[in-house]
Image (cartoon, grey):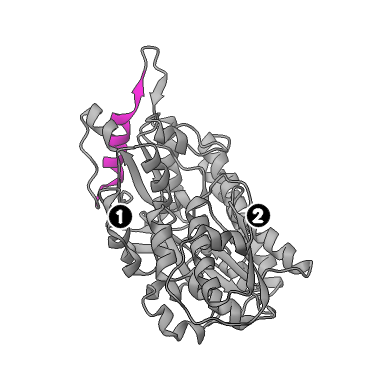
Amino acid sequence: MALITRRRLMLSSGALVAAAAAGGARAQSDETATLTVQTFGGDAELAGVTAAVARFNQSYPNVTVDVSIDPISTGWGDYVTKVLGQFNAGRPADVYGTAIETFRAFAARGLWLPLDDFLKEASFSDLAPSLIAQSAYDGVTSYVPIGWNNIMTNYNRALFDAAGVAYPPRRGQTWDQFRETAMALTQRDAAGNVVRFGYEVPNQNFFVQPWFLTNGTSVLNADWTGSNMLDPRVAETLQFLHDLIHVDGVSPVPGADTLDNQFMAGQVAMISRGQWIVQNARANGLDMDIAAPPVQTTEATVIGFGGYAIARDTARPDIAKALVVELTSRETQREMGDRGGGVPGRRDAISPEFLAFPPSADLYYETLPFTIPVPSPANFQEVEKIFIRHYGAMMAGDESISDGTAAAHAELEDSFARLREQGG
């Protein structure tokens, strides 16, 4: 999912109601309560939540909704720590918005109300079935899906045009073809210094996953219970990315910061991102489009998506469910999608505005059958940190590929052994 550098926001229900246009008349409840919502995101998510709470308050005018939005600026592992801290302190929210990276970490601890019967209601009949299936853990569904992102190759069309390079095909580009394209788009000055990179080798776990998936492998095994780092295809993938940096010179070494701003400024021609990048591209007037990730052996990309859960011990589960209906509604998902908050989980929430930009926006849905969830075990926060630490060292040349994969494998296996001891 997206990492949005944005300050934490606190909203009162009064401000939310004032901010959204009033809808049609609704039957009103005289129930009085206060609900707290902990969710995530930036401007697009804030706008969607604002409108959703306003609609909810049309039916529940005496219910105060306090919303805290976390920008996830330091990763999902830290969000897990934050939420668990709220439960451990005895001050959990009533409703939580979170992402698949955290689903098992939370569900395995029994934090949520089971929602299987709730999801059978008509309100959710148009949600993508695959998202509902991926929202279950141990046979119990605890999340109502919202928007999703699958990583695509985002490219600056103006830079392709200026370099006389053909746009990548919508689907089916090979790794070798991608490499040639990245080399053709990389520009150097008279002294040989790079002034424009052809590609950004990703610095984040979610962004880099398609490279493994399109090579028919993954950093974890199929059921996310152990390491797969010793698979030769993992090493092959890492070597390919390493060579883009150190042999071809088409990418800088991944650092702490992403190159989104450099992409917007035309200093990087291609990056691997989800639909959330659209809001900034529009704001910057960027002439960009998307293509499916290049293929080595398998057509695939990674998917990550959000969902809403209800705390098991909430004092008002009935009102919390009514709020979740609005937070996941067609109207909410359409507004978030139009603003760049992810691809709506409801197909009929797709608007003409959503499909208008980028030009190949329909590819988000076209590639849905080939998506594979980002590996998200119950110990995700440990797994992500272990993988990224060694991945970063290998990309920088501080660890060899063979040493890095072996060390990561050993640490991951230790982490899963601890998880099994804890019953996770």
User: Does the residue at mark 2 contact the one at mark 1 (Cβ under 8 Å)?
Assistant: no
> Which residue is painted at 54% across and 45% down in the image?
391
Which residue is tagged 1? Answer: 353
- The amino acid type, in three-letter code, at marker 2 is Asp
Image coordinates for residue 394, horizontal then vertical, percent? 53, 40
Image coordinates for residue 217, horizontal then vertical, percent? 42, 58
Looking at the picture, tell me which residue is in the foreground, 61 or 331: 61
Mark 1 surroundings: few (<14), some (14-19) or many (≥20) residues within 10 A: few
Image coordinates for residue 230, horizontal then vertical, percent? 51, 55
Which residue is tagged 2? Answer: 78
Q: Is residue 411 magenta?
A: no
Disc 2 to disc 1, how far (Cα)? 34 Å
- For residue 413, the mark is none
Looking at the picture, tell me which residue is in the foreground, 140 or 398: 140
Looking at the picture, tell me which residue is in the foreground, 391 or 363: 363
> Which residue is painted at 60% across and 67% down in the image?
96
Q: Is residue 101 left or right of residue 366?
A: right
**In the image, which residues are magenta?**
172-188
Q: Main secondary structure of the magenta part?
A: helix
- The amino acid type, in three-letter code, at marker 1 is Glu
> Which residue is painted at 30% across and 30% down in the image?
185
